[in-house]
Image (spheres, grey):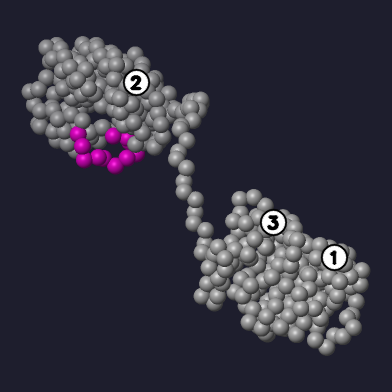
Amino acid sequence: MFGLLLVFCWAFKVVRTETLGEMVMGEFRLVHVGVVVALAAATATAVGLVGAVNATNGGASSFVPIVPCRLVDTRPGSLVGTRNTPLGAADTATFAVWGANGSCAIPNTATGIASNVTAISATTPTFLTLYPADAAQPPTSNLNPAPGQPPTPNQVTVGLSAAGAVKAFNNAGSLDLIIDIVGYHEPSSSGPAGPSGPAGPTGPAGTNGATPARVLWVATAKGDFSKVSDALAAIGTSLPASSASVPYRIEVAPGTYTETATLMMKDHVDLEGSGRDTTTITCACGFATYPGSNANPTVTLRAAGPDLHTEIRDITIVNTGGNAFSVAILTSDSSAGELGMRNIGVTATGGTNRNPGVINVSSSPQMADMTSSPPAAAPSSTSASSMMGQDRRL
């Protein structure tokens, strides 16, 4: 910025010592050569000048320097431009910039011009304003000439109207006006994207989210437990016992989980898989006598007791047998509304006598959306039990 100020002060001094005429334009050329040099050495200043023109079209632009040319000279007898009479009081003159005007040839891609504007022979103190021809006159001034002053120049960067023109307004009295152009701005697009920079350092690892209270995760890897039987065994031993005020939910990830003994459901403990046929619990848990008449039958999953509050859902239970009877699920002595089973697939095979999917003994569980296979043979006495067989959906 200091380079720019020094150049302009030096140029102004030279202009004041010369008579009016072509020397004004010649000295202006020295001014803008100095400006270009200063801008080349001060990138921040150059960027600021380009940005100042963007008010007209709102887009990025680039500056194109040219050999200085004269657009307008309103002095009587001048042959430059479309007007050779002074600007009067409150007078606004419009000057086309695009195309061949005066001694200039500016392309119609220009969105603004960098110019040297000179006021001559002002008859009263006044101000002069340049602005785009299709914009409202701004409450600013570019020059403030007064009577008796020598020719008064100033550098003016101004946007163009949509038709490529500028207006000049004189506030009071009369004066002559000279506009010399040293360059123009035109729209530009950004260049191609540069190469990606190096990857930044890896940020610190976050903390693991808290596991919801009393939700136990069973998964083949990275779960709280790898088997449902282990999760059930932990409740009441390494974990607080379940109750109405301390309920649990055992959630089982997708996969097949093999058990070696009956899963005994506990009060206020729900068992939830990741979907029927998505999560499967299987056991080769055949038994020699009919499970409904045996106090401790071997089945894959058992829910027993009049005060058992539990729900089993979204899972498949399988018994592959290996003895006379193969039963996937056995419920007994449950009260209505306290035991629920929904969206469950049950399969029982391998029993040499019977293969019922579900047996309910003196029990009234709520059952919904369940399938069972294969078909089960009727027991010798069904007064205290019900059996669910092939493809029966409740």
In screen coordinates, is 208 left or right of 66? right
Which image quadrant for residue 313?
bottom right
Q: Which residues are magenta?
A: 131-141
Disc 1 and disc 2: Cα gap in Å?
94 Å
The answer for how far apart the CA atoms under marks 3 and 2 are is 72 Å
Q: Type of residue at label 2?
A: Gly
As drawn, 145 above or below 369: above
User: Dot 2: few (<14), some (14–19), or many (≥20) neighbours within 10 Å?
Assistant: many
What's under tag 1, amino acid-wise?
A: Gly
Q: Position of residue 214 (x, y in %)?
A: 54, 65
Residue lying at the far bottom in this picture: please name it: 383
In contact (CB < 8 Å): disc 1 and disc 2? no
Q: Which residue is mark 2?
A: 183
Query: Viewer-proximal residue, 63 or 315?
Result: 315
Quadrant in the rendering for residue 55: top left
Residue located 76% across and 75% down the image: 296
Q: Quadrant of the N terminus?
A: top left
| Residue 260 lies within the magenta run | no
Residue 360 against residue 113 in the figure, above or below: below
The answer for how far apart the CA atoms under marks 1 and 3 are is 23 Å
Numbered label attached to residue 321:
1
Reading the chain from its start, which is encountered first: label 1 or label 2?
Answer: 2
Above or below 387: residue 167: above
* The C terminus - image quarter: bottom right
In x, y percent, where is residue 303? 70, 75
Judging by the rendered image, the residue that carries numbered circle 3 is: 254
Q: Sequence order check: which comes first, mark 3 or mark 2? A: 2
Sequence-first disc among 1 and 3: 3
- The majority secondary structure of the magenta stretch comes to loop
- From the top left corner, tell me how far across and down residue 142 is, in percent: 21, 30
